[in-house]
Amino acid sequence: MRVLIAFIAALLLSGCAATSVFNPYPQQALAFRQATLGGPDAAAVMLKLDSKRNSNDRMLYLMERARLAQLSGDYAASKADFEQVIAGFEATADKPMLSLSGAGAAGSAMLTNDNAIPYKGYPYEQVMVHQFQAFNFLGLGDAQGAAVELRRAQQVQRQLELKYAEEISKAQGEATQNNIFVSEYDSYFTGMDSIAGQVKNSFQNGYSFYAAAVIWEALGEYNDALVDYKKALELSPDNAQLRDDVIRANQYFDGRKATKAPAGSGTVVVLYEQGFVPAKKPVGLGIPTTDGGVFSIQFPIYDGLDYTPPTPLTVRSDDNNRQQTGLLVDTGALAVKALKEQVPALLVRQILRARTKYEMQKQAAKNGGLGAQFLTNIYNLVSEQADLRSWLTLPANAQGVRLALPAGSRSLELSGSSGSLSVPVDVRAGRTTIIRVVEVNGRLLTQTFAL
């Protein structure tokens, strides 16, 4: 019992209680989401996130901090934080994306929960890091740098496509080797099926392809623009805007010499990020023990209640040109798909951990009496926390629309589920302007980038 008490004390003193091991991440992220609007508490939130740079969750806290800095217009600080995140991703590029039993069985993770494993991000988060880093380059006046960053996002997607399916298959095989049959737990995850089924996989992102295409076209790199418009359309085949973009981009190569906009006009592209990606929630699973008992574990799921179905933003110019945004990426569906893909690996770790904790509980009762058994039971209840970590200031989805407007000082009326907002825009003949619209906490934030 003295050894057990010493172990628990060591865990608490090591900082586990201050991270996600005993403090569910979605509760921490409530403050981060509120800080997207700025206000007096935003500075305190940024300092708190900065203080987490040396924790197991440093990659996650850095992504949240970079997102908040960007939405506040501090592109340099956001760029610096994202650079650290990208370096972290690159340092683990050759390692498995899915942590199987071997990676999760060592150290305190085997006796606490998955939150003790250093956070290394989901594939869709890795792509979005490059997407948002591109906006930092735009905010700093470097359109070429933004295009290159978006090209890196596409390279990441190709790399993931080559390796991720193999890792999922490997995780399923390891589950079978450990006599863990995933199908027995399917009923717990059926609520995620309809949402996960809306996307092909958890990392291909039409938003990054579309943003890259817009920038390439503005820079006169028409072949690259056409390729990326086609890739975006492949992922969102029902998007009428993307079909028009592919048709227009094709005209650069069929002798018709298409222009970006009619003479005397400029192009305005509105990129709309709606809401927040859903947070995971815990569900209890009963795991049979070897002696006929049941050990309860906490498992992460999406219940669908926090999922935000995409709704369009209406964009109307002062000359009554009225358009609606079309879906480019459903980030919420990517998040749900990512969790579904990881269920076999998660079950392996969770069940192996449950077996270890159950044996510890039996040994405590055998060697330490009722006092040790009671303490072990309490510890198991407290330490059994589902891993609910994910980047929670991400948008639920992203959409886009293109308008050709007469050159000059114009005004756009934006109308969506969070109300309306009038945005001035300087339309330049033959040039492209991006207006980024972010809907958070019932308000619309805007950023303008001239290309």
Image (cartoon, grey):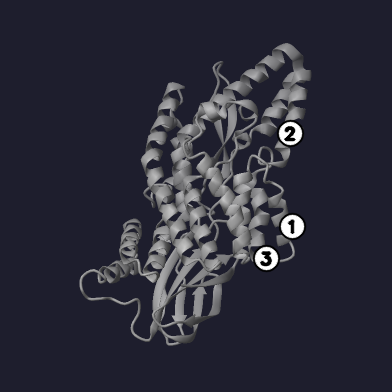
Residue 104, position as x, y percentages in the image: 56, 30
Check contact, mark 3 vs mark 1: CB within 8 A. Answer: no
On the question of residue 169 being in view, the answer is: yes
Q: Disc 1 marks which amino acid? A: Ala
In the rendered image of this protein, does residue 34 appear above or below residue 259? above
For mark 1, what is the residue? 44
In the rendered image of this protein, does residue 9 appear above or below residue 202? above
For mark 2, what is the residue? 14
Residue 152, position as x, y percentages in the image: 44, 53
Give the residue at x 74% y 21%: 4
- Badge number at residue 38: 3
Quote the CA–CA distance across marks 3 and 1: 11 Å
Q: In what element is the residue under mark 2?
A: loop
Nearer to me, 353 or 119: 119
On the question of residue 438 being in view, the answer is: no
Q: Disc 3 marks which amino acid? A: Gly
Give the residue at x 43% y 51%: 195
Give the residue at x 41% y 30%: 170
Lower position in the chain sequence, tag 3 or tag 1: 3
Neighbourhood count class around disc 1 (C-alpha, 10 Å): few under 14, some 14–19, many 20 upward: few
In the rendered image of this protein, does residue 441 appear above or below residue 88? below
Lower position in the chain sequence, tag 2 or tag 3: 2
Quote the CA–CA distance across marks 2 and 1: 24 Å
Q: In what element is the residue under mark 1?
A: helix
Which quadrant is the N terminus positioned in? top right
- Badge number at residue 295: none
Q: Disc 2 marks which amino acid? A: Ser
Nearer to me, 66 or 328: 66
Quadrant location of residue 259? bottom left
Neighbourhood count class around disc 3 (C-alpha, 10 Å): few under 14, some 14–19, many 20 upward: some
